[in-house]
Image (cartoon, rainbow, N blue to C red):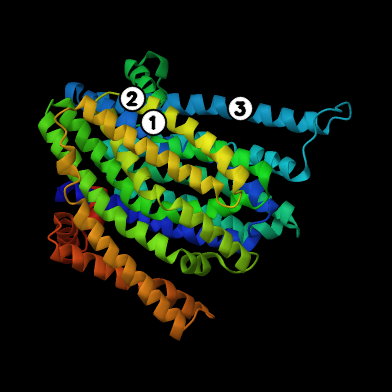
Amino acid sequence: MSRWLSSSGAAGAATLLSRILGFVRESAYAAFMGTGPVADAFFLAFQIPNLFRRLLGEGALSSAFIPVFKETERKEGVAAAWRVGLACTWAVFLACTAICLVLLGAVSLVLWYSNSKSNVYFHIDIHTELMFQLMRWMLPYLPLVCVAAGFIGMLNARNHFFLPALGATMLNVAMLASVWWLTPYFGTQLHTQIFALAVGVVVAGVAQAAFQIPSLVSEGFQFRWLSPWKEPAVREVARRMGPSVIGVAAFQINTVLCQSFAYTHGREIISSFNYAVRLMELPQGVVGISLATVMLTELSTLAADKKFPEFRSTLTEGLQQLLFLTLLPLILLLTLSEPIVRLLFERGEFKAASTAQVTLMMLCLSPSLMAFSLNNVLARAFYALGDTKTPMRISLAAIAANFVAAFISVSLMPKAGLAIANSASSTMQCFLLFYALKRKQPKFDLPALFAPVLRMGAAGLVAAVTALGSAWIWNRWVGHATLPTKMGATFIPMAVATVAYFLTATRLKIREASDVLTVLRRRKKTPASISTAGQTSD
């Protein structure tokens, strides 16, 4: 347990750094463009190329590729596994380039037809036109980030997690540079300066892919042309990846579909929802995705060796650890949403009204944190067993439910509808995945899995009361008028609630708390462990 928990800690540490930089980036975005129509146009335009980063970089490609890579490595050796990796990389690059060209053509056609003098039937407003123009600039990011995802998948398959996850920091550095240094070269108006951010997105894709190359070369990878059409493993990865694109990424697909619908109901909904999602992505990335990434390799190995009792016990331990680690950030987001939003975003063009709007989104979206994290691990359990169809079918049902819920909730409550719909659909997906897994593995012991949940809930309740109480005391006696007091209003209740959570969990003898503390003590004794984990056998 502690071995792969430590590995997920290495990936989580890199993801934490990336998410922190991501918050700095979003804070810079908020100060630069707030939550107005230009911000909505940028965020919606970025959703299309960014969807592929989320699908491949955080799920589908690694979920399909790693089991095939490990099977090839065990049966044919490392050289054959590298051949599979190279062929898959070329396949991903060529396929994504083709998709990029098709989308570029479609967007250009829409813009041309809308502005055509002979067109009397179809016209788009100025902000929608800006959205399509920004999308056209950012689409080359698509093949770049997909190649980076392929590189990361190969490194994860070789038990490298820290440095590959650290590559996401390059994306944030490039995008931050575009806000701080590139925007003055694009004019003085927001609707022209926003194109500097689009350039930063493409540069970020180049940087993220290039960052992985030294680690790959040190492992023995040689980049050269290799026809993907002649490699059977590529077809196997494609076969598995097709359903898993939907299986792992239901949340991201839901986001794109529903944001496109919500865009017609107001010009501040998309940006407000985007900032709320960014807040939730920190615990998702550090805990849910990092743990799921490491567990996929472990579960794939056990499934390949037909060690199904060990497979079930490993999955149970991983899910219990996920429940324990996700509960605390869920409580902190529910109890401290307003001070968190105020500290991170409220400056420049991001006013107090924007804080209230994003806080409402955050409160409605937070319940999906637990479900989304569980969905990542449960879907990967199916992929390790070679089953990609079951998660696909469940995700299709969740997507349909989400769109219906979004149609109703956005129409009735535009300011919170997107968040409510996402929370409802991700929770439904989680229940269906548990039900399907129990049917596929009848010996999977669900009562044993949820045995510590009541004790975890008690620890969570103590943390919630502590967070609310300490926040009330701080606002009563100190306030939040300055930056230091805003920081105190956020971090003091967080710290007190975290201590209360772990102390209560320890007193209640929750094993997952002891596992976390053991790993932390071990890392404190060996400060080089993180860098070693990223470079050798993390």
Determine whether the residue tagged by mark 2 lies in a helix, strand or loop: helix
Determine whether the residue tagged by mark 3 lies in a helix, strand or loop: helix
Instruction: Report the Cα–Cα distance between label 2 and label 1.
Output: 8 Å
From the image, tell me which residue sits under label 2: 390
Q: Nearer the viewer, mark 3 or mark 2?
A: 2
State if disc 1 and disc 2 touch (CB < 8 Å). Answer: yes
Comparing 357 with 57, the one in front is 357
Specify the label residue 228 is tagged with. none
Other residues around mark 2 within 10 Å, as few (<14) / some (14–19) / many (≥20): many
Comparing 532 with 5, the one in front is 5
Determine whether the residue tagged by mark 1 lies in a helix, strand or loop: helix
Q: Earlier in the sequence, mark 3 or mark 2?
A: 3
Q: Total label count?
A: 3
Q: Residue at x 43, y 26 (%)?
A: 90
* Lateral position of residue 120 relative to residue 40, left or right: right
Query: Which quadrant of the view contains residue 262?
Result: top right
From the image, tell me which residue sits under label 3: 101
Residue 3, image x, y percentages: 16, 48
In the image, residue 364 above or below residue 475? above
* Lateral position of residue 33 relative to residue 383, left or right: right
Q: Nearer the viewer, mark 1 or mark 3?
A: 1
Q: Disc 1 marks which amino acid?
A: Gly
Instruction: Report the Cα–Cα distance between label 3 and label 2.
Output: 32 Å
In the image, residue 389 above or below residue 275? above
In the image, residue 396 above or below residue 495? above
* Lateral position of residue 305 relative to residue 255, left or right: left
Q: Disc 3 marks which amino acid?
A: Leu
State if disc 2 and disc 3 touch (CB < 8 Å). Answer: no
From the image, tell me which residue sits under label 1: 247
Q: Disc 2 marks which amino acid?
A: Thr
Residue 156, image x, y percentages: 29, 39
